[in-house]
Amino acid sequence: MVTANIANPAAITTAAMARMFHLKRRSRVMKKKLIVNSQNLLVQSKKTWPWLISALTLGLSLSTTITPAQLKTNQQIESQDDALIIGQSIPLTGPSAELGKKYHAGAMAWLTHINKQGGIHGQKIKLLSLDDQYEPQQTIVNTQKLIQQPDLIALFGFIGTPTSKVVLPIVERERIPFVAPLTGASLLRDDDLKMVFNMRASYAREIQAIVNSLVRNAQQRIAVIYQNDAFGEDGLQATLAALKTHDLKPLTTATVERNSANVRRAVNTIADANPNAVIIISAYVSSAAVSKALRDRRMNVQIMNVSFVGTGALEEALPPGQANGIGISQVVPFPWNRWIPVVSRYQQLMRKYNPNAAYGFTSLEGFIAAQMLTIALERAGKNPSRAKLAESLESIQNLDLGGYTIDFASDDHQGSDYVELTFLGAQQWEP
């Protein structure tokens, strides 16, 4: 049992049972080694979130969270002490804001650490984060404004499939590295995309792990609720493929709209089919609404989500006790297991630079992604070009960060296939 060292003794925590499916590629050969490990672990959530500070400066750290209308001019950005400029479009307001805030917090913990050490080759890293509310059209606007900055070297940590999908033509046309988007969609894993560098595992691998677990537990009457956009459709296709490996088909399917808690029709469809398991492929707003409705109907179903739902955000959106038993696939290690070196480093820097923030999978993903980015920047040398950064990312092969391995190649921009399953429980913990 692992506990998190948190500042708030009243923070609610939950128990989780994790089953790890860690697939590790060796060099450029697509050989996979499956390591299965089961352990009882403790998940901690927190009901409040410290807000992101505009023009945040921590020591030598540089981060700016701004609306599109507030984007700084070229001259202002160029005067930032010869900084390395990284652009980001994420939800900072709106129904899906918690995903953006938590990812940003984890990334900034690492970037602050690097900047306080003097930066990369003497250059500090400046992260420009624009709010898109998880709406694709605003993501396009944000991206177009970001790429107008002549010193912008990369786009980093975009949140979601529909928001990432719409900027792919811009990314490829401008030949700018698109690094570590928070999405497992197959459309970002097309071999023809030369500037996209995925760190996290695909939804196909997450959903295969989910389906395998359900089938092992004799839960084969599986229904699917998916978001009515590119994310949901990608997840549905991955679910169909995973079910096919067990000669199964969905009992029924239903859709929900992005950023919406209006799920009555979808829940009615699911209830009429009487499944014993439901796979939900949506952000936490819709997933929480579906889960609550199923619980209110006292349906005895195993609810499963992919990692994009956001574990902490989902639990915070549900009434007390209704998160119990919900399963979520994860693509980074357990954030409260300080015996994992990369997690220990994450906890240390989060406590140092964001002491009021709760640990979580989303912020850990941002932390690891930022670490990967800085390693590539260091390899690229001083004043690197976009092309040089892309080459440096491809040079990251079989890199073990301490419990999380990243392995790229010139013909393989999928960094990790790490997947584990977690199940929320009902225990409380106080320090």
Image (cartoon, rainbow, N blue to C red):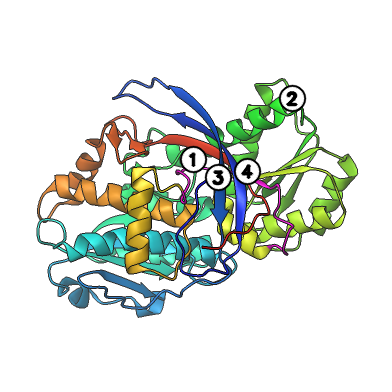
Q: Amino acid at mark 1?
A: Leu
Q: Which residue is mark 1?
A: 187
Q: Are marks 3 and 2 in contact (CB under 8 Å)?
A: no
Judging from the image, what secondary structure is the residue with disc 1 in?
A: helix
Is residue 37 at least partly visible in the picture?
yes
- Residue 282: mark: none
Does 293 sit left or right of 160 as displayed?
right
Q: Could you tell which of marks 3 and 4 lies nearer the N-terminus?
A: 3
Label 2 Cα neighbours within 10 Å, binned few <14 / some 14-19 / many ≥20:
some
Q: Could you tell which of marks 4 and 2 lies nearer the N-terminus?
A: 4
Q: Which residue is mark 2?
A: 248
Does 243 sit left or right of 379 as displayed?
right
Q: Which residue is mark 4?
A: 233
Task: Say above or below: 173 vs 117.
Answer: above
- The image quadrant of residue 117 is bottom left
Q: Amino acid at mark 2?
A: Leu
Name the residue rendered at 57%, 66% in the picture: 11
Q: From the viewer's side, name the closer residue of 8 and 64.
A: 8
Q: Amino acid at mark 3?
A: Leu
Q: Which callout, 2 or 1, points to the residue nearer the camera?
A: 2
Is residue 151 at least partly visible in the picture?
no
Q: Which callout, 3 or 1, points to the residue nearer the camera?
A: 3
- Boundaries of the magenta span: 318-336
Q: Are marks 3 and 1 in contact (CB under 8 Å)?
A: no
- Residue 41: mark: 3
Q: Could you tell which of marks 1 and 4 lies nearer the N-terminus?
A: 1
Q: CA distance from mark 4 to mark 2?
A: 18 Å
Q: CA distance from mark 2 to mark 1?
A: 24 Å
Q: Amino acid at mark 4?
A: Glu
Q: From the viewer's side, name the closer residue of 166 and 339.
A: 339
Q: Which callout, 3 or 2, points to the residue nearer the camera?
A: 3
- Considering the whole magenta stretch, tell me its main secondary structure: loop
